[in-house]
Image (cartoon, rainbow, N blue to C red):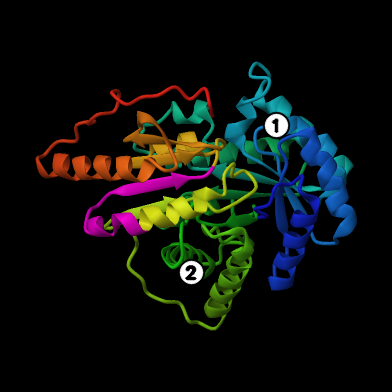
Amino acid sequence: MTATRTQDIDATVAQVQALTSAGADVVRIAADSAQDAAALAEIRRQCSANLSVDLQENYRLAELVAPHVHKIRYNPGHLYHHERNRPWQEKVRYLAAVAQEHDCAIRVGVNCGSVDPAQQGKYDPRDSLSPMLDSAWEHCELLDSIGFARYCVSLKDSDPMKVIEVNRRFAERRPDVPLHLGVTEAGIPPEGIVKTRIALEQLISRGMGDTIRVSLTVPNWRKAEEIHVGRQILADIAAGRVRSVVPPGQGRLNIISCPSCSRVENEAFVELAERVKEMTRYAQGQALTIAVMGCRVNGPGESDDADLGLWCGPHHVHLKRSGRRVGVFTYAEILERLRAELDDLIASRAAGSDAPGRTERDQRTSESL
């Protein structure tokens, strides 16, 4: 996936070409506005790569972008953000009609941090996989019922063990549906590579998966590393070089961070993720999860699931503790406050409790975001 601003046509074309030169078969570009769609038309004119578009929150953009891409990706959980009173089934029928008209495939992209709220309400909050599966299955059933066959499904989580389990369960029921595999928010290398390798080795070696994506938190100029890592993992699997590794997050600190992409509103997010990793080295023996998220699309929901979650806006960073709001801080302030919350959380757990600490005292308005 490109990490440039879609409307920066020259930079986006250059990154598409760099990714394809590195071995990418499909390149995904995000579109969140009519201006993005107009830029995508020019990007298509300048490059011949297989392009997939990420509709993000605005499914209505499909008719503007479909003439210029080969695949449309939508997230079932994001279909509720526009025209809330319109049934999701009507929205999917619209997407399928647009895709059919322009000879596009569809990816139904189910993500752990933005699951269909109607499905989430049916299960215990500790069961994150069943809502994802029900959402994927019902979208498949609808597409089947209207005769749209050119679709695939992805079910992604930041925990590679959950990625393995959710895809295994999906494939048991729908072995006929192509799967796109990946670990979302895998994080900074080398840990992000290890997480990705765990999931891909286990799934592909069992015959699951048709396409893959490697999602690493790296600066824009290093995006081609994702392709090199993916190609190496595939080559190792094909040669029987499947490695045995210890799953991350088992009794030690687990840092998850989303890949740098065009949704990131401040590129300082990547540097912040690296600084969080460095600052928290003293807590490596703690069984805690810290999430560093780079955008407003997935940040609010996915940071809720972490013990400490950060999601980054253009100028400020939101900090949450076990889903509870701590406050909004500048990029210069956030590390000091994160460390204070981490120390308090470690002390609270050692004492046999997990008090929310000073979550409300330092709340600030987010009007400036």
Q: Nearer the viewer, mark 2 or mark 1?
A: 1
Specify the farthest residue to the left: 351
Q: Is residue 356 above or below residue 278?
A: above
Q: Is residue 222 above or below residue 160?
A: below
What is the magenta range?
278-294
Residue pointed to by mark 1 = 58
The answer to whether any part of residue 201 appears in the image is: yes
Q: Total number of numbered labels?
A: 2
- Looking at the rendered structure, the kind of residue marked 1 is Asn
The C terminus lies in quadrant: top right
Q: For the residue carrying disc 1, how many other residues have a C-alpha within 10 Å: few (<14), some (14-19), or many (20+)?
A: some
The Cα atoms of the two marked residues, 2 and 1, are separated by 34 Å
- Looking at the rendered structure, the kind of residue marked 2 is Glu
Residue pointed to by mark 2 = 201
Label 2 or label 1, whichever comes before in sequence order: 1
The residue depicted at 46 percent of the width and 39 percent of the height is 311
Local SS, label 2? helix
Q: Is residue 135 above or below residue 195?
A: above
Question: Residue 17, image x and y in percent?
Answer: 77, 65
Question: Residue 291, image x and y in percent?
Answer: 40, 46
